Image (cartoon, grey):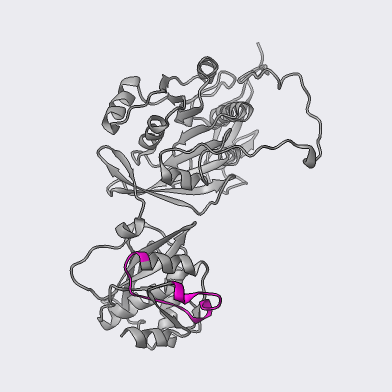
Amino acid sequence: MAKTKTTFFCQSCGYQSPKWLGRCPSCQQWNTFVEEILEKTEPSKGEWKSSTSTKISNKPKLLAEVDFEAQPRMLTPDKELNRVLGGGIVAGSLVLIGGEPGIGKSTLMLQIALGLRGKRVLYVSGEESEQQIKMRAERLEQKGAECYLLCETSTQNIFKQIENLEPDIVIVDSIQTLHSAFIESSAGSISQVRECTAELMKFAKETATPVFLIGHITKEGTLAGPKVLEHMVDTVLQFEGDRHLAYRILRTTKNRFGSTSELGIYEMLATGLREVSNPSEILISQREETLSGVSIGATMEGNRPLLIEVQSLVSPATYGTPQRSSTGFDSKRLNMLLAVLEKRGGFRLSTQDVFLNITGGLRIEDPAIDLAVCCSVASSYEDIPISPKICFAAEVGLGGEIRAISRIENRISEAEKLGFETIFISRYNLKGLQTSNFKIQIKAMSKLDEVFRAIF
């Protein structure tokens, strides 16, 4: 009997070591190594046997000799998913979707499976029974003509059914529940997740069949399993949002076929996920009276312009050290802007508590909302409300200057479409900008005090 070969894997990053280590030399985490059994013998890895790849050896080709035909992307009925994927599903792509438990990953994938018309979809579930999936499908009120269910965890059995069915799309829920017979360790372990993903990737590339994988995340919010899992797949999507709120955000963290800055927004209803085609309307709260400390900023998420509401509260510090708290905005950048307001604007903020909130649960890293943040803080400090028909799109420098930003036309068009009357931008953005094309009043400023004089 052959000796069982074992090795140690880091649960955080997938680093492999022949012996146990207290601290991982790759990710510097403590007590993350676990022992796993590797295969006892080297099997003939026929996990996905193609008719051509076993005997024909590859030869190097000139790049100019490679045959290439631009294949049309497979469009889904979900426009938000099409945008996030870069224009639709690419043939042979491997897509990994991660998110917290109960956020709606399985609901989203089942909606896609039921909504595709004329495509044969195989939905593989290792977590739920057929009755549970049927119950969810009845709640979604969609009829999938060619949506096949398979409750199986063995990759060998899954590939047998795939050969018989020949589906156009395969959805796996979830990758942590699958196990391969070639690996001795239990399902969900690092070596099993890596092996099962490798088998599915080989199948996807050789048959040009798109494969969607649903993955669990750790308590730190990262995808569970080895870090190599994210390197193997073509696209990594993160499904975010608070389970206690109705809105969900589908964000791209890696995409070999499109931009990584795209964003899709959904609303969770009793009948499933509804696409939010105009997110600016939900990100700007409807209020009956004008309040101080509220301003509207124009930001970009990928190719999509968004108008978001910035809320500030400035009050005298009760304790010795003033508090600086921000939700959805970088706290270091907030401290920098407060220093600019104190030095260049004359606001005595060193004795004030400052609280900042970006509504809608978004996290904004675009510097174009700097001016909106400054005006919001100044409005709360002076207790003078800003007109709800004014929005801002500019970066603020350390000298109190208003700096130019990119894609200013898209931001102005979005503000005009939503009924705003005035937008404040940088004077340096006027170069090449056709202001006559817009009906909205465009005010170009170069200094922060000019903006304050115009508003207050």
The residue sitting at 81% across, 30% down in the picture is: 59
Nearer to us in this view, 261 or 346: 261
> Quick one: which residue is furthest to the left in this view?
288
Nearer to us in this view, 263 or 407: 407
Percent coordinates x, y for residue 436 in the rendering: 45, 76
Q: Quadrant of residue 393?
A: bottom left
Rendered position, 150 above or below 391: above
Nearer to us in this view, 314 or 455: 455
Percent coordinates x, y for residue 252 in the rendering: 49, 48
Rendered position, 131 above or below 28: above
* Residues rendered magenta in the picture: 417-437
In the image: residue 275, left or right of residue 212: left
Percent coordinates x, y for residue 300 in the rendering: 46, 62
The residue sitting at 35% across, 56% down in the picture is: 279
The residue sitting at 51% across, 36% down in the picture is: 74
The residue sitting at 60% across, 41% down in the picture is: 231
Rendered position, 448 above or below 56: below
